[in-house]
Amino acid sequence: MTRQRRILVVDDEPQIRRFLRTGLSVQGFEVIEAESGAEALRVAPTARADLVVLDLQLGDMDGLDVLKRLREWSWLPVFILSVRDREADKVKALELGADDYMTKPFGAAEFVARVNALIRRIPEIAAQPKFSVGDLTIDMARRQVFLGESEVKLSPKEYQLLQFLARHAGKVATHQQMLNEVWGPGHAEDAHYLRIFMRKLRNKIETDATRPRYIITELGVGYRLLAPDQYDAAS
Amino acid sequence: MTRQRRILVVDDEPQIRRFLRTGLSVQGFEVIEAESGAEALRVAPTARADLVVLDLQLGDMDGLDVLKRLREWSWLPVFILSVRDREADKVKALELGADDYMTKPFGAAEFVARVNALIRRIPEIAAQPKFSVGDLTIDMARRQVFLGESEVKLSPKEYQLLQFLARHAGKVATHQQMLNEVWGPGHAEDAHYLRIFMRKLRNKIETDATRPRYIITELGVGYRLLAPDQYDAAS
DNA sequence: CCCCACGTAAACAAGCCGTAAACACAGTGG
DNA sequence: CCACTGTGTTTACGGCTTGTTTACGTGGGG
């Protein structure tokens, strides 16, 4: 096997945490725990877990909100547990970015088998709350952007756009994709916004906005935030 | 936008295939079908599907055997359907390499949501988004083309054309096919465009555009991008 | 010898992109 | 209650890349 896999279990009931922990550690997983949504969101960015097991019923907040917040910066696999068996609940969770959904009560064997099936699909890195190219660093957990040591203040839309680019670093982000993600559906025609906000972004993060080194425009298609290897190759 | 996802549905009951097909095609998936284990194993290698939906109960053989045989050469995601709800059955299927397991009867909405959750994970696994012949490399995930180490800048139409050729490498791409794919329907008469853009492509990727080594013209039919073995044989 | 399909070259037109500036709007603090 | 500040939207324009149009050259087969 590769290195040991780490799993973050989020549940407010101690006996369920215990049940999950024993099942998972027998399989050789390292288990870390959080007993509330707030704690989960606090430890997730630094925990470097490979998978999150999330109970929908938490003491302090709705599990779906935790999932939503997590998905703002991480595509870490998420395994949902719930007592609710309605199909609509499952569909909602899956559409929000969950990878599997089990209804309590369930058997430990199936749970572990499903966790293994998910883990198997994750090559190495999926969490990565930080992204870096050259002098540019994006801390997605803290919603902060740095150029070298100094922070760059971005407006909400500017940040959303840059984050989307970072999540697809190296690949081309289509006009459609960005308009859909940042402005929502129904703005497919407003490709014009992109030009204006790309200009603003470049003015803030590029040293010479007329010769961009980070945000490359792919004419007729979209924009590309260079991945580290591409950035190095362009030097 | 990414390309359309293709799903292979394996089930011996026509009404279930129909049920799945309607649910999936509404979501924009392309569905291909197999009604037996043998047929599934026969078409799978060439079908270039992104996901397999496999019923455990087939006319000719056990679904688990199909899964086992498939896993000998492919790590394509597999979604298991079954009437059996025993935990041991689920665990066995998951351990054999299945990615999800649903018990019949089930709702179409949850099924589609789970399929989407699986598909979503694909680009990270992405079997083989790169194509290479000789010094030419096409990185389809990043939408980049290289000649040796240095990148070749292509315009949208140029890239679309080259990508189409690469997807059919070794085989002949017809005039009609290319005009349909790149220029859309209604340009069947404009075979002239092809000559102009092939020239542009050759100028960018061939060392001597008058003696092409990659893009061969098949007189009266179309063009062909050599597959690696053909390229080696021509040296 | 001529015809057909393909290759080549240049000029043209449209679409796309970058840039700037004015405007509307909300939140803040005096 | 009002100026001030930052943000997002709207409008306008010039320049460059791209795709299209047009024209001519080439080479093999009937």
Image: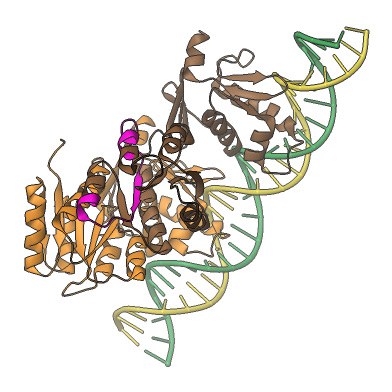
Chain colours: A orange, B brown, C yellow, D green
**Is B38 situated above or below B132?**
below
On screen, residue B234 versus residue B130, left or right, reads right
Front residue of this view, candidates B69 and D2: B69
Estimate the x, y position of residue C10 in percent, counting from the top left: 75, 27
Front residue of this view, candidates A203 and B172: B172
Estimate the x, y position of residue C15 in percent, counting from the top left: 65, 49
Estimate the x, y position of residue A145 in percent, counting from the top left: 29, 54
- Identity of the residue furthest to the front in this view: B59
Q: In the rendered structure, does residue B222 fall within the stretch colored magenta?
A: no
Residues in magenta, as a range: B67-90
Front residue of this view, candidates A223 and B213: B213
**Is B118 situated above or below A19?**
above
Q: In the rendered structure, does residue B78 fall within the stretch colored magenta?
A: yes
Count of labels shown? Answer: 0
Q: Give me the residue at 21% from left, 49% from top.
A: B91
- Residue A169 appears anywhere in the view: no
Q: Give me the residue at 70% from left, 19% from top.
A: B219
Estimate the x, y position of residue A183 in percent, counting from the top left: 47, 63
On screen, residue A85 versus residue A223, left or right, reads left
On screen, residue B19 versus residue A158, left or right, reads right
- Residue B152 appears anywhere in the view: yes
